[in-house]
Every structure is written in C-alpha cells, then in structure tokens.
C-alpha cells in the first residue's frame, strides 16, 4: 500500500546540442535548504513552503491519492479531480453493463445528476507528516518486555489508533529505509466519490501495451472524478445532500507552454523504489526473476486475448484482468531490456567497489548470499506465477480459507464472495489458464516442493496437463456455479468444500515452504 507522498525532481536543461538531466526522489516533508538551492539552480522559482506546508495551503493539498494506488490532481474549486484513465479503469469496468459498456463507449456526465457514485472509492488528502520513530520503537520494546506480539502490524495498529484519536485525521504509519525511520502520515479521507467522465478506451489506451510505458505517448490517458463532502466540506458518507468540496489548493494549467531549460517537478504517490538495490539483486532480477515474470505473464495474456477475441462477453469479463497483466508485463519487459541496454549491473558494481573499497569482505559476503539463494528465488518466482497468480480458479480455491466452523456469518460471507467471483469468471478461460499454470509449476519447481495433490496428479497423469486440468474441473464444486449454488444450500458442507480439488490445489504448498529453505541456506 502506498502510504507516503514523495517529490520527484527532474532538473532538465535542453539545448540544440544536448539534453542534460539530473534527478532525485525525496519524501515531500524532507525538503531542506540544500535541496531548495539545488532546485533553484535547476530553475525552481518558488519556495519549499509553497510545495509543502502544514499550516498554509500548498501544492501537496492539490495532489491526492486514489485508494493508495494512483495519484490524482485537483483542478477546480468544485471538487473536480483528474487522474490517468488506467487508474480509473477498474471503476469504469465495474460501472459498465452489457447494455452500456462505458469502457468502450466512454462517458461524460452533462450535469451533476449524471455523475455516478463509485462504491468503495477513497480519496486521501495529505495534511501533515511527523517522525514517530522513537515512539514506535518504545511501543515495540514495551510489548516485548511483557512478552506480547510485537510485529509491525501490531505496533502500527497501536500507534495509528492513538494518533487518529488525538488528531481527528486518518493516521497511517510507514517504514522507511528498511525500518531505520518511521513516519506518521495524517490524511483527510473522502468516500463520496463520483465518476464524471472519460474517453473510450480505444482513445484513452491508444497504442495498447507498447505505448503505455513509452514516451512520447499518443493517447488521451485521463479520467475525471468529483469529490463530495458535507455542507462544511468535510468527509461524509454518500448522500444526495452532499456538495462538491472546495480544495485548499488546485493546480492551474499554464497557457504559456513549455520553454527551453524549464524546471520540471513531479509530486505524487509512487510505489516503492529499488534504486538503492545492490548490483547482486539487480543482476538476479535481470537474469532470472524478470524474464520468468515477463514470459509467464505474456503467455497468460495470449490465452486471455484469444478468448476475448472470440466472445464479447469474455472480453467484458476479462478486459480488466488483461489490462492489469499487460500494464505490469510491459513495465517488467522494459526494466529487463533497459537494465541490459544501459549496463546497470556493471555501473552499480563500480559504485559499490568505490564506496566499499575499504571493506571488500562485505561485497563478497553479499555476492555469496545472492548466489546461494538464486535457485530458491527462481522456484519462488515460478510458484508465484503459477499456483498463486490469478483472479479465477486461484481465487476461488483460496476463498475456502475464510470459512470458520459453526459461523453462519462467515459462511454467508464466503458464499457471497464466491458467487461474485463467478460473475467475473469463465470456465473455458480458467481451464486453459490452469493447464498452463500447472505445466509452469511442475516443469520448473523440484518435486521436493510439491504437495500431496500435485504428486497425486503427476502420479496419475504423468505430464498430461490437459488430463490433470480435466480431473480438477470435472470433480470440482468450487469451479462450477450451478454445483456450488446447490451445495451451498447446506450449511454443514464445509468439509465438502475443503476436499474440493480446486481447494486442494490452492493449499497444496505455501510460500513458507520455500522461505524455510531460503532461511536455512542463509544461516
């Protein structure tokens, strides 16, 4: 979950003969005099307090997070928010119907009554950030002294609740620099969010997978939402009496255009950065983990694309899943290609040798450690891409884990979640995906990591993956909507579900089985 806001500074000087770029990434509250001077040298003409201030309106108040998954910008005094189309893709998909596919047709609300409420959507406005490192460490030490659970989730929960009650804001703690620092982020959170409009996906995602991670792009990759609050502009549950909020700050578009040597700056909520990874980790990602993920995701996309082209109903059901795969796969493919193209591993090695020249033993130890776990990391990657990855048969099989004996509420919730998955599921697509994913796992992960159900399948069918898949689908209640509906009428059918072939496959092995060996190797 992306709980922190950063500032990405790109200092760009452009002339007829050369392009010069200098860049860096900082937590937005960490702007200091040194960084301010560096930015001013690059062309910045505003003070750091205009970018981040806890007491006055600043640029941070115009930049929001959508579900901690995407960044949006406030562009009007009536709560209008603009973000990327791909950030709204899931919402547009869920708002579509067979009669009106908003993804393919696009949508524009002509007035406020046509704005569509988006259930479950949350927009976060950052208000302030405090260093809570000492407080967190104190809570952890106190729990350990009385022999209470002291893991990150437990400690975060304790101090987040405390700060939420004291401040009145939503409080969220984040670990930085591998746990060396902890910061508490305070947010105003709005949940009455309404979809305003977006162009058709053919225009918004023109160029498809290739264009998404390239520059320049040739598409209208945007969507509009509006944020509503109570009569005072404060967060409130959905109500037809709510009104559009007036943000503390909005972003204005300059009509002057971009000039030579202009300063460029990005503020947003990104994912984690691996820029400080060692050369050994980058090398392993380039040679092993990245290529496995790119190839496996690509094959899944081929399977899904084939069925989407055959059937319009499948195209609607799987367009969101396909988009998610293509978005990540294209990015990973670019990472692998550019790591090789720009010789990143060698450049990192040179930096490390320079920085650690007086302690070469550390580099040798790291190199040995990565070599020792290389094989097990490869197996874990194949496992994640085969018996974990997916929203169809994988998700259905795993739903049984939520069942609690003699708990009717748990049982009813389980049935509803499974029935919802059936609306996003097509047995023909899932069967072909399962055949591929069984092959991927069995042919690439050693038998010592196979669970009893995988051993049963290979013992009975050897390498006939189509027969294995048919065995599971033919005997599964979980994978058949009609059979599941009938079986779910009986409240005491938990044992039947637990013994379902799809459930056996889902719980056959766990990541902990592989991590145990990795831990043993590193001892």
Image (spheres, rainbow, N blue to C red):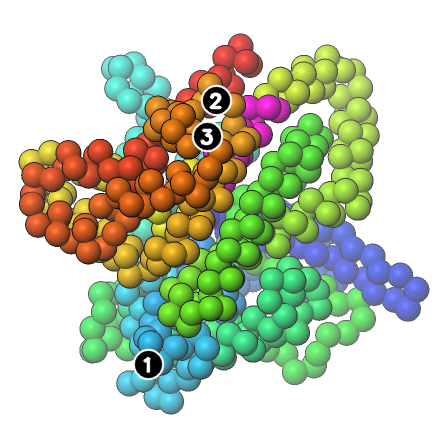
Q: Distance between the residues labelled 3 and 1?
A: 46 Å
SS majority, magenta: helix
The residue at the point 39 percent across, 50 percent down is: 431
Give the residue pinned by disc 2.
447
Q: Nearer the viewer, residue 317 or 197?
A: 317
Task: Pinpoint residue 159: horizontal percent, then vertical percent.
Answer: 31, 36
**For numbered disc 1, what is the local secondary structure?**
loop
Task: Pinpoint residue 321: horizontal percent, then vertical percent.
Answer: 44, 58
What's drawn in magenta, residue-wise? Answer: 374-386
Q: Are marks 3 and 1 in contact (CB under 8 Å)?
A: no
Give the residue pinned by disc 1.
99
| Residue 17 against residue 479 in the figure, above or below | below
Q: Earlier in the sequence, mark 3 or mark 1?
A: 1
Inspect the magenta stretch and tell me whether residue 380 lies in it.
yes
Q: Nearer the viewer, residue 10 or 42?
A: 10
Q: Which of marks 1 and 2 is nearer the N terminus?
A: 1
Task: Pinpoint residue 355: horizontal percent, then vertical percent.
Answer: 77, 25
Q: How far apart are marks 2 and 3 (CA)?
A: 13 Å
Give the residue pinned by disc 3.
462
Inspect the magenta stretch and tell me whether residue 167 lies in it.
no
Task: Pinpoint residue 442: horizontal percent, then vertical percent.
Answer: 49, 31
Q: Are marks 1 and 2 in contact (CB under 8 Å)?
A: no
The residue at the point 38 percent across, 70 percent down is: 313
């Amino acid at each position: 979950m992306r709980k922190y806001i950063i500032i990405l500074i790109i200092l760009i000087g452009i002339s007829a003969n050369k392009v010069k770029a200098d860049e860096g990434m900082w937590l937005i509250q960490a702007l200091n005099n040194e960084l301010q001077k560096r930015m001013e040298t690059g062309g910045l003409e505003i003070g750091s307090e205009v970018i981040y201030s806890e007491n006055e309106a600043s640029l941070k108040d115009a930049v929001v997070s959508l579900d901690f998954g995407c960044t949006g910008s406030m562009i009007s005094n009536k709560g209008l928010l603009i973000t990327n189309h791909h950030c709204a893709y899931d919402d547009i998909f869920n708002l579509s119907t067979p009669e009106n596919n908003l993804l393919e047709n696009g949508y524009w609300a002509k007035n406020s009554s046509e704005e569509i409420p988006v259930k479950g959507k949350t927009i976060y406005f950052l208000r302030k950030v405090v260093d809570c490192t000492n407080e967190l460490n104190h809570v952890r030490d106190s729990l350990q002294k009385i022999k209470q659970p002291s893991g990150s989730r437990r400690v975060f929960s304790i101090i987040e609740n405390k700060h939420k009650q004291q401040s009145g804001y939503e409080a969220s703690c984040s670990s930085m620099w591998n746990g060396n620092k902890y910061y508490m982020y305070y947010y105003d959170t709005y949940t009455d969010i309404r979809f305003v409009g977006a162009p058709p996906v053919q225009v918004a995602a023109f160029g498809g997978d290739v264009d998404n991670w390239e520059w320049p792009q040739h598409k209208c990759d945007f969507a509009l939402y509006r944020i509503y609050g109570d009569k005072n502009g404060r967060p409130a549950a959905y109500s037809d009496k709510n009104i559009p909020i007036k943000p503390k700050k909005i972003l204005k578009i300059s009509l002057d255009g971009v000039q030579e040597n202009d300063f460029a700056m990005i503020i947003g909520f990104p994912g984690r950065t691996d820029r400080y990874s060692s050369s050994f980790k980058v090398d392993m990602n380039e040679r092993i983990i990245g290529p496995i993920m790119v190839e496996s995701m690509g094959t899944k996309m081929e399977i899904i694309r084939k069925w989407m082209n055959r059937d319009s109903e499948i195209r609607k059901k799987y367009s969101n899943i396909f988009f998610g795969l293509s978005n990540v796969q294209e990015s990973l493919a670019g990472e692998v290609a550019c790591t090789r193209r720009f010789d990143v591993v060698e450049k990192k090695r040179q930096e490390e040798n320079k920085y650690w020249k007086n302690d070469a033993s550390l580099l040798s130890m790291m190199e040995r450690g990565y070599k020792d776990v290389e094989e097990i990391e490869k197996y874990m990657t194949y496992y994640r891409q085969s018996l974990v990855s997916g929203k169809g048969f994988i998700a259905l099989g795993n739903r049984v884990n939520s069942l609690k004996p003699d708990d009717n509420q748990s049982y009813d919730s389980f049935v509803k979640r499974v029935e919802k998955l059936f609306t996003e599921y097509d047995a023909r697509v899932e069967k072909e995906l399962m055949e591929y994913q069984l092959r991927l796992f069995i042919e690439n992960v050693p038998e010592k990591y196979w669970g009893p159900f995988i051993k049963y399948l290979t013992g009975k069918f050897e390498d006939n993956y189509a027969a294995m898949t048919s065995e599971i689908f033919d005997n599964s209640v979980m994978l058949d909507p009609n059979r599941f509906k009938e079986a779910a009428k009986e409240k005491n059918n938990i044992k039947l579900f637990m013994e379902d072939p799809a459930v056996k496959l889902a719980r056959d092995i766990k990541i902990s089985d592989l991590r145990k060996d990795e831990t043993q190797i590193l001892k």
